[in-house]
Image (cartoon, rainbow, N blue to C red):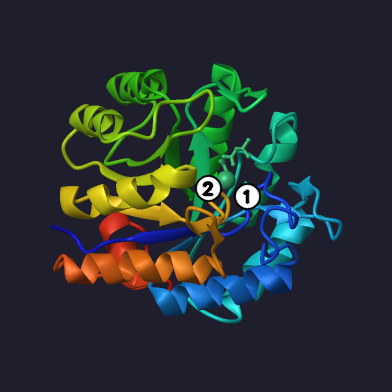
C-alpha cells in the first residue's frame, strides 16, 4: 500500500469567519496555514482565493500571491481550485491554471450544492482539461456523485483522459452522494486499476470516511473547506489540528504518511528539485 497522502483544503469558497474564526483568508494566512499543515503531515494543500473582505475570487494575482506565500514556507504540492464559487463564469474559474501550479481540481459534472447549483457544462469541462494539459497541470477529478465518475470513465474510454488518474470523492454534500462507507466502497469499486483516490467527507463524514480511506489504501482530504469541527459541538482550532489527527490515525494503523516528494512520486508529478 502506498504511503498516505493528506490534502489540507484550507478555506474553500463558502466557509465564513463567523462559522470558523480561524479560517485563513489572506495569502499570508493561507501560507502560514499551509506550513502548519505541512508540519502536521499534509503533502498537498487545496487552495481557494478570497478578497480581503472574505468574499471568494478567482483573481490570478491573488492566487499568485497565495502560491508564493506557500512556497516561501514549505514544499507542499499546491492544488488550485477551478471550482471557485457557485455562479462564477468558467473563464473566471480557469484563471489560476495559467500560473502552472502542480495540480488543479476538475469537477466532473454539475450538482445541487446546498441551496445552489454548481454548474459544470461538459463543454466547459473539456476546456478546463485542455488548459490543464497545455499548462502541465495534473487534474484531480472531483466526484460529487456517481454519474460524475461515469463521465470520467467515459472520457478514459474515449481517450479524452489517458494514463492513471487521481480522483477526489467529495461525499456528504447536501445535493451530492451520501457520506457513507457504502457510497465510498461503490465509487472505489468502479475505478480502473492504477487510479489513485482521496476522500473529502463533508462535515461529520470527514473523520469516519478518512479513517476508512486509510485502511482501504486511498488518501484523505481534511480541512475547513469541508468541515470546521474537530468533533460534534467543538470547532477545530486549526486546519493543522485536523491534519494531525489523520496522520496520527494512519501511523497507528501502520500506514506511513507521505512527504510532498513521496506524494509527487505516487501521483506521477515531477519532483520540484
Ligand atoms: N466551491 C465549490 C462550488 C473545487 O474547489 O474544485 C466548488 C469547489 C470545488 O470548491
Ligand atoms: Zn475547493
Left or right of 3: which side holds 200? right
Left or right of 244: which side holds 94? right
Relative vertical location of residue 237 with respect to residue 143 in this rendering, above or below? below
The reply to whether discs 1 and 2 touch (Cβ–Cβ < 8 Å) is yes
* Residue 229 or residue 10, whichever sits in front: 229
Q: Residue at x 54, y 28 (%)?
A: 174
Asked if residue 245 can be seen in this view, the reply is: yes
Relative vertical location of residue 159 with respect to residue 199 in this rendering, above or below? above
**Where is mark 1, residue-wise?**
12
Residue 77 in percent (x, y) is at 46, 64
Label 1 residue near ligand 2, CB within 8 Å: yes
Q: Residue at x 42, y 24 (%)?
A: 145
* Residue 260 or residue 4, whichever sits in front: 4
Q: Earlier in the sequence, mark 1 or mark 2?
A: 1
Q: Give residue 88's mark.
A: none
Residue 68 in percent (x, y) is at 66, 72
Residue 261 in percent (x, y) is at 34, 71
**Where is mark 2, residue-wise?**
226
Q: Residue at x 65, y 68 (%)?
A: 30
* Residue 215 or residue 163, whichever sits in front: 215
Amino acid at each position: 500500500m502506498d504511503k498516505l497522502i493528506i490534502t489540507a483544503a484550507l478555506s474553500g469558497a463558502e466557509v465564513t469567519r463567523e462559522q470558523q474564526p480561524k479560517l485563513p483568508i489572506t495569502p499570508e494566512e493561507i501560507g502560514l496555514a499551509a506550513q502548519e499543515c505541512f508540519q502536521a503531515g499534509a503533502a498537498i494543500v487545496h487552495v481557494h482565493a478570497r478578497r480581503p473582505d472574505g468574499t471568494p475570487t478567482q483573481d490570478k494575482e491573488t492566487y499568485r500571491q497565495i502560491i508564493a506565500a506557500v512556497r516561501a514556507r514549505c514544499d507542499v504540492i499546491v492544488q488550485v481550485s477551478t471550482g471557485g464559487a457557485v455562479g462564477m463564469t468558467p473563464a473566471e474559474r480557469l484563471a489560476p491554471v495559467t500560473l502552472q501550479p502542480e495540480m488543479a481540481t476538475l469537477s466532473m459534472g454539475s450538482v445541487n450544492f446546498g441551496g445552489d447549483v454548481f454548474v459544470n457544462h461538459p463543454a466547459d469541462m473539456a476546456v478546463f482539461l485542455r488548459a490543464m494539459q497545455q499548462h502541465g497541470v495534473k487534474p484531480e477529478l472531483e466526484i460529487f456523485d456517481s454519474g460524475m465518475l461515469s463521465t470520467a470513465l467515459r472520457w478514459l474510454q474515449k481517450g479524452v483522459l489517458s494514463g492513471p488518474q487521481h480522483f477526489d470523492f467529495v461525499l456528504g454534500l447536501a445535493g451530492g452522494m451520501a457520506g457513507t462507507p457504502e457510497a465510498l466502497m461503490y465509487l472505489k469499486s468502479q475505478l480502473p486499476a492504477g487510479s489513485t483516490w482521496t476522500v473529502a467527507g463533508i462535515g461529520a463524514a470527514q473523520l469516519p470516511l478518512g479513517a476508512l480511506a486509510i485502511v482501504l489504501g486511498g488518501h484523505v482530504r481534511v480541512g475547513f473547506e469541508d468541515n470546521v469541527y474537530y468533533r460534534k459541538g467543538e470547532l477545530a482550532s486549526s486546519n493543522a489540528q485536523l491534519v494531525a489527527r489523520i496522520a496520527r490515525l494512519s501511523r497507528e494503523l501502520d500506514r506511513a504518511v507521505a512527504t510532498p516528494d513521496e506524494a509527487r512520486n505516487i501521483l506521477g508529478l515531477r519532483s520540484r528539485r
